[in-house]
Amino acid sequence: MMQQRTKTIFALPSTGSTFQTSGTQSMPTTHTPAICFDGCRLSIEDIVTISQQKSSAALSANPDFRGRIQKGADFLDRLLKDDGVIYGVTTGYGDSCTVTIPPELIAELPHHLYTYHGCGAGRFLTPEETRAVIATRLASLSQGMSGVSIALLDQLEALLKHDILPLIPAEGSVGASGDLTPLSYVAAVLCGEREVMYRGERRDASDVFTELNIQPLRLRPKEGLAMMNGTAVMTALACLAWQRANYLCKLSARLTAMNVVASAGNAHHFDETLFAVKPHAGQQAVAARIRSDLASPKPSRNDERLQDRYSLRCAPHVIGVLEDALPFFRTLIENELNSANDNPIIDATNERVLHGGHFYGGHIAFAMDSLKNTVANLADLLDRQLALLVDTRFNHGLPSNLSGCTGPRAAINHGLKALQISVSAWTAEALKQTMPASVFSRSTECHNQDKVSMGTIAARDALRVLELTEQVVAAMLIAARQGITLRRRIDTDLQLPAALATMQADLEDRIPLIVEDRALDKELQALISNIREQAWVLYDEQ
């Protein structure tokens, strides 16, 4: 079971290999901190940093840990010698559990499992996603409850060490019995089969293994099942999704503050006393962030309108739902990350084989269905803020469509008109994706898998919603930078608080003021990359 010792992190030299991240070739660092896999509890950040190659994965050399792993494999060996009946070892899989495997064919069974599951489709997982999947499966098997050999764990570590990335199709998992089909591609690569990405090239795994003098694995009984019958794909994607959502939560607050300034809005909407009477901690934290960004005791304008529209006034209430939910999502994701989640569970200490359903990804499905809902609401909030900024009926004196052009040429320049249309399209698509995947359970595999989680589909949906929302946020960075500059033309005495002044200066360096119409796609793509790299440090307390 999971150990409660302190997790070990230490420095290891890099392998010297280059790797691809988000389509660009990167150079390795001289040393990277290593996350030790020894059954201790890991965090979302551990998986994310491994996926980004900011950390490496190191399987523990501790004799007690390795002995605990070997104890499970030895127990299975004894059961086989004693003619024990073990699901997926001496029987067929799923509905075929009543089929007895002849002793002379037992060794072939795990290789048949990953072979017939080689039917995935769709896009391949990205390098970051693939590293996260391998690390997540290694974390689960390191719990010591799966009956696998240390050689299997060593081989998983080798994939990460050398950055040998199985080509894993994203589609084909119903989330129980775990991520069978996508994980079959990892199992096959461990045995030197199928294809990998290595140093930016698509190659046969066997050729890469020969080049690196890596011996293909021959799976022991139960090891095919242990590799595939688990929640590693959905959990890995959930780790990456959580990290991206957490950053968007903060960046949405910063953008809201900038849009309040650009709109000549009312800073009193974020008053501390006001939010003290509605004690949602996340909502209060978001209001405090916006309040600290605005740092103004007075409204920005003096007219008859006491209240800004909801997309500004209620921004903490919208963003705060995600802020409040993120710790709960973290608990669900990290509990799954640190679980033994295949079937059967091998309790070598008490010499028991426990048949259950820990491959069921319901908690991840719920977390991802909920996360994509709260993230899509960020896109919708910012879309509404942009609609106000570009409209002269609501933007309190700013030019139409935030065009920076003046004089006769203003007639042919259209500013952010098309950008607002694109933001509306991205937002609509994000909102469309929020239908929960978990309610679409399908009965499969001769009704053996008759209630399934759809957790992997939910996680992929969440990543798509995040992608669309990041596009909205990138557009809003352009709009906020443009809006504040144009507000300064009207209010020449406007002094930005320190945090917003720093952000505005940074954006001005990245984005020239839009005076004459120009294509914005390259700037948008650069900003999207900046968002995913978390280029801006947001809020000291975080």
Image (cartoon, rainbow, N blue to C red):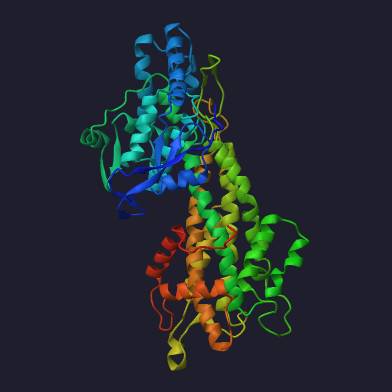
Residues 6 and 471: in front is: 6
Residue 240 in the image, given as x and y percentages of width and height: 48, 48
Residues 114 and 274: in front is: 274
- The residue positioned 35% from the left and 28% from the top of the image is 115
Residue 430 versus residue 50 in the image, above or below: below
Instruction: Tell me if I can see residue 106 in this picture.
Output: yes
Residues 183 and 444: in front is: 183
In the image, farthest residue toward the bottom: 408
Residue 174 versus residue 315 in the image, above or below: above
Please tell me how many numbered marks the rendered image carries: 0
Instruction: Tell me if I can see residue 462 in this picture.
Output: no
In the image, farthest residue toward the top: 82
**Quadrant occupied by the C terminus:** bottom right
**Quadrant occupied by the N terminus:** top right
- The residue positioned 41% from the left and 24% from the top of the image is 223
User: Which image quarter: residue 375?
Assistant: bottom right
Residue 351 in the image, given as x and y percentages of width and height: 53, 14
Residue 386 in the image, given as x and y percentages of width and height: 56, 72
User: Which image quarter: residue 392?
Assistant: bottom right
Residue 515 in the image, given as x and y percentages of width and height: 43, 83
Q: Is residue 186 left or right of residue 292?
A: left
Residues 175 and 444: in front is: 175
- The residue positioned 62% from the left and 65% from the top of the image is 289
In the image, farthest residue toward the right: 277
